[in-house]
Image (cartoon, rainbow, N blue to C red):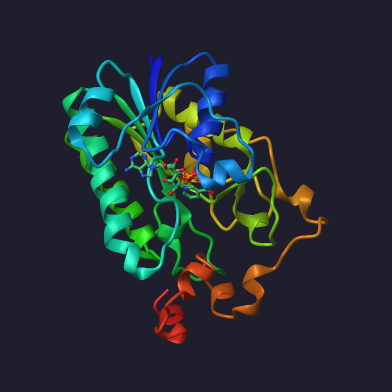
Amino acid sequence: MVKKVLITGAAGLCGSIVSNGLIKLGYKISSCDIKTSPSPAAKALKIPLSKKIKKIDLRKINKVLKITKGIDAVIHFGGIPRHKPHEDVYKNIIDHNIVGTYNVFEACRINKIKRIIFASSAHIMGYHNRKKKLDENSAFRPDSHYAVSKCFGESLSRLYSDKYNIKILNIRIGSALPKPTDMRFLSTWISFRDLVHLVDVGLKSKKLYCSSVYGISKNKRAWWNNKEAYRLGYKPKDNAEKFSKDKLTKNEFKDKIALKLHGGVFTTDGFVGNIANILKNN
Ligand SMILES: NC(=O)c1ccc[n+]([C@@H]2O[C@H](COP(=O)([O-])OP(=O)(O)OC[C@H]3O[C@@H](n4cnc5c(N)ncnc54)[C@H](O)[C@@H]3O)[C@@H](O)[C@H]2O)c1
């Protein structure tokens, strides 16, 4: 049974929400982050930090090995949470997301940790046609270097579950926010309580081997079929539709290409591709 849980990226938005939520559910939480003050996203939403956060840089394998000793499960949120301008790709995405994630999985193998929850992203599906409903088996179609780093994490998950017998849940988070503020989020939103519940399912489910699920609430306008999450025991309480009458921004609506694809504006940032070919090959 999972009792002692390490959360990476614990000073971040999702890390703080999930740490606080899991403590209430009775888990013993260890928290780490490269910084001990709230991330810009957590600060903007005034999310309280959970408990004492240990300063650990995931790029340093020795530190990750130390902090994962005696832990039952790791929830891996630490990393760069979004697409960044191209000049930052090598410095940020490769170091923090690819090397950092590799170090977390390797430390879990060496320290015989039985479960990992990996914060993936729905942007790994970015270049799929929005008219198509996707599920857990849809092919990767990443829309950014950031999304490629999440594909790398999901590939590590397959290797570490098959070869090293670690149970792994990849949560392809849509938009974790207090409530939807843009039209897009009516499809992609996950409420904080549903996120905590989905992580709890990942820590407890006896049916888990290695699964990828979508981190969304039970949204009426969802673009993703989340049957794998339901099979594992996910029972979301929230639906973005109750905010559909709110004054929502329409950030994607100026961008005709973004509106055709799952990844929205991530797909058109720096885009010199051919939308007709993308849709023909979808
Ligand atoms: N919030 C969302 O809607 C959303 C959507 C899709 C995916 N995700 C994923 O969930 C995770 C958490 O996202 P968030 O929104 O909470 O972002 P966030 O920026 O608030 O939190 C990320 C945390 O990771 C830490 N971090 C970065 N590099 C690190 C390193 N080398 N070592 C240790 N810690 C490091 C940061 O300091 C930060 O506190 C990310 O991996 C992100 O890609 C989030």
Image-quadrant location for residue 260: bottom right
Q: How many marks?
A: 0
Left or right for 227, reference 80: right
x and y percent of residue 275 in the render?
46, 83
Quadrant where ligand 1 appears: top left
Q: Please name whichever residue, 43 or 262, is drawn nearer the observer in this view of the structure.
A: 43
User: Which part of the image, by quadrant, shows the C terminus?
Assistant: bottom left
x and y percent of residue 11 in the render?
47, 35
**98 over 266 or under it: above or below:** above
Q: Please name whichever residue, 64 or 181, is drawn nearer the observer in this view of the structure.
A: 64
Left or right for 43, reference 269: right
Q: Which residue is at 35% across, 52% downward? A: 150
Image-quadrant location for residue 208: top left
**243 over 70 or under it: above or below:** below
Q: Which residue is at 49% across, 39% downward? A: 12
Q: Please name whichever residue, 86 or 275, is drawn nearer the observer in this view of the structure.
A: 86
**Any part of residue 113 in sight:** no
**Any part of residue 184 in sight:** yes
Left or right for 127, reference 116: right
**32 over 172 or under it: above or below:** above
User: Which part of the image, by quadrant, shows the N terminus?
Assistant: top left
x and y percent of residue 205 in the render?
44, 25
